């Protein structure tokens, strides 16, 4: 056995069990640009954890990321020294243990402490194990007396610590929404995500899918947003169900259907999906077009297009042509009836599902991405027929990426006009300017934005 193999074997043994895997993933989130979902997917694929343990791992890593601001506030208060400079293995083992103590009823406090102490001892030795033991037991003893910043003295610090969001985000939202709505938004971001299914009418009907859900005793409710969606009452691994593999539905947030409904594609049209992967919107467009006409789906990366193609194949979509290309370089002799620009964005509307984003993003990211978004919108507009319609959409709630960008585009492009969304989308999801806008604390779905622009003949 060579040295690197021995180290790898040792490393994999050190991080065994649910808590070990959790610390390993959290270390990587801290140290790299990698996103939580991708790291978790790799870890689950390569582990031999049982189904229940996989569910617990998912719960712990998402929970720690969701509540990291509050966990770190508490740990900083009890840690002797600078908690932020603590050894990564110890830091994340403490976060995992404290998350279990504060948020998971099934694990007794003493068990969470013992597991953390044994784990730290194995990785970092007795000194750090003793530190972890003393710190966690001290927190448990004083659990009811934990104090947060005084909101009367520093509202941003209080909301940031208690609701676990970075202070720059809290400041922005306070200025825009006021205290009451900001608290509601922060609380909504910390709630567990809802699992929604889009019925694939190319394969089945809503009535048939409901009957199949009834047969396996999965409880559900109809979506209030769109008739094509069903909400499951519990998080389950629905992708293992045979009807998922047979293409009866796709798993996607209800808010992702709004831009497609606003686009209003019809059978026989020619449609461009400028930023298509992983393909949820392309598939819904194909469904609305009854697989008639043509959809051109672009993405820069071959690997992402392969995922898209696999999804479309599963959903029995036959009218999509994919092309791996930078959207800004795409040219076509024939113009399109409809263009969807589902732009890359900060993703700050999706924090229930992607809690690590709030710690990965900063104001600079928003400033940087706005230029790319504007270029993509301009590109999409150049490929549209006179009289055709373009929908620009994001999964963020930040004005620079949304209505400010549309306003700037319309000022520079008088041959385009904004179409009010009320005719196609329920009034509850359309703001006073005619844009589609959803907010997690108001609508119970991801935060999103969509605007429809028509090219004047």
Image: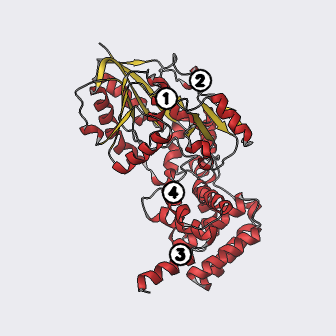
Alpha carbon of mark 3 to alpha carbon of mark 4: how far? Answer: 19 Å
Of pointers 3 and 4, the one earlier in the residue sequence:
3
Mark 1 is surrounded, within 10 Å at the Cα level, by few (under 14), some (14 to 19) or many (20 or more) other residues, namely: many
- Which of the 4 quarters of the picture holds residue 372? top left
Location of mark 2 (residue): 428
Q: Nearer the viewer, mark 3 or mark 4?
A: 3
- Quadrant of the image for the C terminus? top left
Residue at position x 36%, y 43% in the image: 369
Considering only order in the chain, which callout, 4 or 1, is on the residue closer to the N terminus?
A: 4
Residue toward you, 75 or 35: 35
How far apart in space, not on screen, are marks 1 and 4 (Cα)? 31 Å
Could you say which is closer to the camera, residue 378 or residue 67?
Answer: 378
> Given this view, does label 2 or label 3 mark the residue nearer the observer?
3
Residue 54 is at least partly visible in this image: yes
Judged by depth in the image, the label closer to the viewer, 2 or 1, is 1
Locate residue 207, reporting x and y percent.
66, 28
């Amino acid at each position: 056995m060579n040295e690197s193999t021995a180290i790898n074997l040792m490393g994999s043994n050190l991080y065994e069990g649910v808590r070990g895997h959790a610390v390993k993933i959290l270390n990587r989130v801290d140290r790299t640009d990698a996103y939580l979902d991708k790291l978790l997917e790799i870890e689950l694929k390569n582990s031999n954890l049982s189904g229940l343990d996989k569910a617990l791992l998912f719960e712990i890593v998402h929970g720690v990321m969701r509540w990291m601001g509050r966990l770190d506030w508490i740990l900083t208060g009890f840690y002797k020294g600078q908690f932020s400079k603590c050894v990564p293995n110890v830091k994340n083992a403490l976060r995992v243990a404290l998350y279990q103590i504060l948020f998971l009823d099934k694990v007794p406090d003493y068990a969470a402490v013992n597991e953390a102490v044994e784990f730290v001892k194995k990785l970092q030795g007795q000194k750090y194990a003793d530190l972890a033991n003393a710190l966690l037991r001290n927190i448990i003893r004083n659990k009811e007396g934990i104090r947060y910043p005084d909101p009367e003295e520093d509202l941003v610090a209080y909301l940031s610590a208690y609701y676990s969001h970075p202070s720059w985000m809290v400041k922005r939202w306070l200025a825009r929404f006021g205290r009451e709505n900001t608290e509601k938004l922060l609380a909504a971001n910390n709630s567990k995500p809802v699992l929604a299914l889009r019925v694939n009418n190319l394969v089945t009907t809503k009535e048939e899918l409901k009957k199949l859900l009834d047969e396996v005793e999965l409880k559900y409710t109809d979506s209030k947003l769109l008739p094509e969606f069903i909400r499951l009452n519990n998080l389950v691994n629905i992708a293992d169900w045979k009807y998922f593999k047979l293409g009866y539905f796709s798993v996607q947030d209800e808010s992702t259907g709004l831009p497609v409904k606003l686009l209003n594609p019809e059978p026989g049209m020619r449609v461009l999906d400028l930023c298509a992967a992983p393909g949820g919107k392309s598939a819904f467009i194909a469904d609305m077009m009854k697989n008639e006409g043509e959809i051109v789906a672009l993405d820069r990366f071959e690997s992402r297009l392969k995922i898209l193609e696999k999804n479309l194949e599963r959903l029995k979509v036959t009218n999509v042509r994919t092309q791996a290309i930078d959207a800004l370089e795409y040219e076509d002799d024939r113009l399109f009836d409809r263009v969807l620009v589902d732009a890359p964005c900060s993703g700050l509307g999706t924090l229930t599902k992607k809690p690590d984003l709030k710690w990965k993003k900063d104001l600079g990211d928003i400033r940087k991405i706005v230029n790319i978004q504007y270029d993509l919108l301009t590109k999409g507009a150049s490929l549209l027929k006179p009289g055709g319609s373009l929908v620009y959409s994001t999964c963020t709630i930040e004005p620079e990426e949304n209505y400010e960008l549309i306003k700037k585009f319309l000022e520079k492009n008088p041959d385009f006009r904004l179409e009010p969304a009320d005719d196609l989308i329920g009034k509850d999801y359309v703001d006073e300017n005619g844009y589609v806008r959803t907010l997690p604390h108001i609508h119970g779905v991801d935060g999103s934005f969509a605007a429809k622009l028509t090219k004047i003949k």
